[in-house]
Image (cartoon, rainbow, N blue to C red):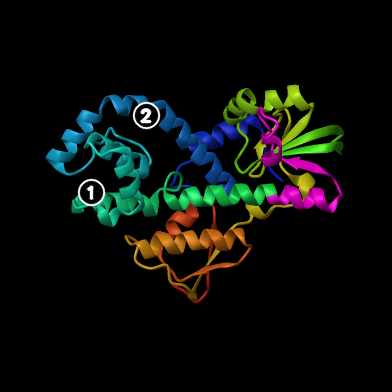
Amino acid sequence: MLKIELRDFIRLRRMLNLRNLDRFSYPKPTLSSILSQKIVERVKARHPVYVKRLNEIAEHWKEKGKLPRWFVAPPMIKVKLLMKALGFTKSEIRRYTNNPDLIEDENLRRLVWKANVTDFIYSPIATKFHQVKGRIGEEIIQSRLESLGVEYLTEDELRKRGGKTPDFLLEKPLKIDGFEVKWIESKAMFGDPSVHSQYWRRQYYEYLKRFGRGIVVYWFGHVEGLFLASTGSEFGGDRLLNMNAHLSDDGMDIGEPFSREFVNNMLELMDLFYEGEKIVIKPNRWAVNILSRLGFRIIADDDLSDR
């Protein structure tokens, strides 16, 4: 399992972008996680500025039919802020981003469809994937605890007691890496100092006060030296670091990109991944693009040309 020294992480994070995800020696899911967290951090920093300039965004769109160059954000954030700028209500934005075919304006409809099939952080496809990988991480821990005969309470059971709760509270401490561990938190992300600090303030410190020492499993690795952080090697699962999507003429036909069929088939792929099924699709550059950005390694049959 993966640990990265701080100086190497800082250099990697600075260099990493959508064009070079395949150029580093780290696992693809780790790189995708680091990049997405970097982008989310930027979105949070810039969002208030964009909200103040909604009128400019709307006027530029009305005059030129495109977004201003200074408006740099993930595709789904762009379309949601644009629609807000144009006067759409929250419920309308939610309905139209989920079903762009309902949008009368052709230019806007195409922009929203493109966001649906390219955004690897905020689109419905990406949201489903983030939920799935979170469930997989928790189930790996659950399976391991049960195989060891370790009794525990889940987060749902603990909520009845009130207060902030970890994913697993152990009935009896479990010795891990030389420490007596009372609780386990599962995070399907990379543990960088910024993320770890945020969760420390919101969750981990409270767990430590209430229950004693625990561990936080970062399934895509973490920066060396983070207090309580684990890579999950104690639980034996590296499934989330080995995500593959195969291209074959006999695979699933994902369909045309700007369509409900495409989105539904991509959502079905996320379910197949959760169930542990092999992902095999017909060559489709839009599907390959988003799967690659989500962290899947794309494996093509030898007899298939690039398409």
Task: Specify whether residue 255 is in view.
Answer: yes
Location of mark 1 (residue): 108
Residue type at mark 1: give it.
Answer: Leu
Q: Residue at x 69, y 24 (%)?
A: 206
The span from disc 2 to disc 1 (Cα, nearest Å) is 21 Å
Q: Residue pushed farthest front?
A: 160
Location of mark 2 (residue): 47
Task: Specify whether residue 26 is in view.
Answer: no
Q: Residue at x 68, y 39 (%)?
A: 155
Q: Please check the rendered image and state whether residue 151 is part of the magenta-colored stretch, yes or no.
A: yes
Which residue is more in the foreground, 4 or 262?
Answer: 262
Percent across and percent down for residue 301 are 53, 73
Q: Which residues are magenta?
A: 139-167
Q: Is residue 220 above or below residue 284?
A: above
- Element type where label 2 sits in the image: helix
Q: Is residue 48 above or below residue 176?
A: above
Q: Is residue 199 above or below residue 119?
A: above
Q: Residues within 10 Å of mark 1 (few under 14, many from 20)?
A: some
Q: Is residue 6 above or below residue 32?
A: above
Which residue is more in the foreground, 159 or 12?
Answer: 159
Percent across and percent down for residue 213 are 79, 28
Residue type at mark 2: give it.
Answer: His
Q: Residue at x 38, y 68 (%)?
A: 255
Q: Are marks 2 and 1 in contact (CB under 8 Å)?
A: no
Relative to 144, 130 lies left or right: left
Q: Residue at x 68, y 32 (%)?
A: 165
Percent across and percent down for residue 177 are 84, 36
Relative to 149, 112 lies left or right: left
Percent across and percent down for residue 287 are 43, 61
- Element type where label 1 sits in the image: helix
